[in-house]
Amino acid sequence: MKGDNKTLVGLALGIGISAYFLLKPKNSGLQPISKIEMENFAEGRGEGAEKITDSAKEKGGNSMLTYHHFKVKLPYYEKAAEGKFDLDKSKKEYNKLLETLNTATKKEINIKQIAFQELMGKIEVLGELIIKNK
């Protein structure tokens, strides 16, 4: 159970950091990246996520939560690596996912573990890509 609490704290911290960068004013000094830089970033992150997904699936057991968390990231990285990242659409989806998380965890945790891992994975990947694209 202690490991689960650490995971929740780590994921909450990741969301907080993502939200901070998403809400920062645009003139924060970050330079927009080129399409090729975005594609290369997404390709590299996708390769890393794929390795983690494969390793977690091979281990099985409790590692399957990690598998579900990273598996949902793969299509997002693939799409961005192909040059099909849509910033406005991604921001809308990101906000919708945050609302889903808030609803599912507001008073009591009312979400299954796998659904939670998948939701957090999507929030993380979209946050990463949005932040990188600014």
Image (cartoon, rainbow, N blue to C red):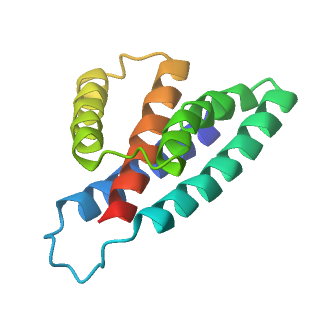
Q: Position of residue 108 (x, y in %)?
A: 31, 22
Q: Position of residue 1 (x, y in %)?
A: 61, 33
90 relative to 60 in the view: left or right: left
Residue at 53% in and 21% down: 113
48 relative to 61 in the view: left or right: left
93 or 12: nearer the eye?
Answer: 93
Please state, as top left, top right, bottom left or bottom right, where the C terminus lies in the image.
Answer: bottom left
- Specify the farthest residue to the bottom: 29
Q: Position of residue 96 (x, y in %)?
A: 23, 30
Could you tell me how many numbered marks the image carries?
Answer: 0
Q: Where is residue 9 in the image (x, y as percent from the top left)?
A: 46, 48
Residue at 13% in and 70% down: 25
Query: Looking at the rendering, which quadrant does residue 19 occupy?
Result: bottom left
- As displayed, is residue 105 above or below residue 120? above
- Specify the farthest residue to the right: 58
93 relative to 38 in the view: left or right: left
- As displayed, is residue 24 above or below residue 2? below
Residue at 48% in and 20% down: 115
- As displayed, is residue 44 above or below residue 84? below
38 or 127: nearer the eye?
Answer: 38
119 or 91: nearer the eye?
Answer: 91
63 relative to 65 in the view: left or right: right
Query: Looking at the rendering, which quadrant does residue 32 occupy?
Result: bottom left
